Amino acid sequence: MILYSFMFRQLISLSSILVFIILQQTLFAQDNAIPRIREFQVPLGTHPHDVAPARNGSVWYTAQQSGELGLLNPLTNKTYHIALGEGSAPHGVIVGPDGAPWITDGGLNAIVRVDPNTKNVTLFPLPEDTGNANLNTATFDHNGVLWFTGQSGIYGRLDPRSGAIEVLKAPGGQGPYGISTTPDGEVYFASLAGSYIARINLETGNATVLEPPTKDQGARRVWPDSSGSVWFTEWNAGKLGMYNRVTNEWKEWKLPGQNPQPYAIFVDDKDIVWLSDFGSNVILRFDPSLEKFQSFPLPSPDAKVRQLLGRAGEVLGAESGTDKIMIIQTNN
């Protein structure tokens, strides 16, 4: 009986160890799982620049070279294009609270709304005295106001209810590029030429400059995580940056590779950071809890993924260099 009891305890102990090992291996495998990257060809010469999730798994994209808004159905691999007007050169696209795609169009010098049902196009031109804003990207705050950037040295806001547009001069002049809204409603933008990120006062419109530790780093695009920390790409410095709004602390991580050029950035629903790297033609996944990069080569050479966005289980990207849309399955 004593021997049996001893053997039983040993068996229980070994079983516990085995369960622990299996659990650890499972967690390790999940952390190092290789995501599935799919590419979808869109019409040649359209030069897709930005993407946004549409209904039923479809993807909106700006066809910058052809002056159109595109819609890709990944299930059928078919595309549908909507002409935005003569002279159009759309840059960014996001989906607003109304479910419609909103576009920053550098060629038209206007914000453009496309009705997702009728496909009707509505223009909101910038004031005539603005000049060529070189419109870049946009975001909605929690009051339904659209904020936008222009690389010529402006940022501004559009109230869709009244159509009123206000254009503001950016600190330091040229450079405003990526812009995004935190979960609690604050709006931040990055200045590529100015090498800073800025927080916008939504009441006054004033921008407060926040300078990352690395000088002349070339902050390009920004995206918040669930806690509101602001992540951004440092194009010139080849780094990933993060600003903690609570502690006012900064962190930076050098990307792997010989000549990293981080461009696009997106933080998914699990707070994993995704980046595109022009230097290595890869997509990078960064786990903040491990402070570790994982690199995934893109199927097509010289893809030039200029923007990332996503939805639960997917990261979307526009390959401007190959006329393709990229979809990453993140829940493999």
Image: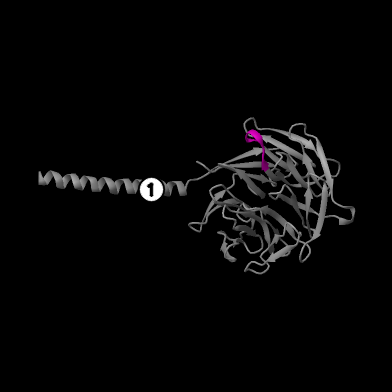
Q: Which residues are magenta?
A: 52-58
User: Regarding mark 1 in the picture, which secondary structure is present there?
Assistant: helix
How many C-alpha atoms fall within 10 Å of the one at disc 1: few (<14), some, or many (≥20)?
Answer: few
Q: Position of residue 83 (x, y in %)?
A: 81, 37
Is 160 drawn above or below residue 244 in the view shown?
above
Residue bearing the label numbered 1: 25
Q: Is residue 43 visible in the rendered structure shown here?
A: no
Q: Residue furthest right?
A: 128
Q: Residue at position x 67%, y 45% from top?
A: 318
Q: Is residue 33 left or right of residue 253?
A: left
Residue at (71% x, 36% y) in the render: 71
Amino acid type indicated by mark 1: Gln
In front of the other: 74 or 1: 1
- Front one among 50 and 77: 50
At a point 72% along the width and 59% down the height, the residue shown is: 201
Where residue 193 appears, as percent x and y from the top left, is: 73, 63
Q: Residue furthest left?
A: 1
At a point 71% along the width and 49% down the height, the residue shown is: 143
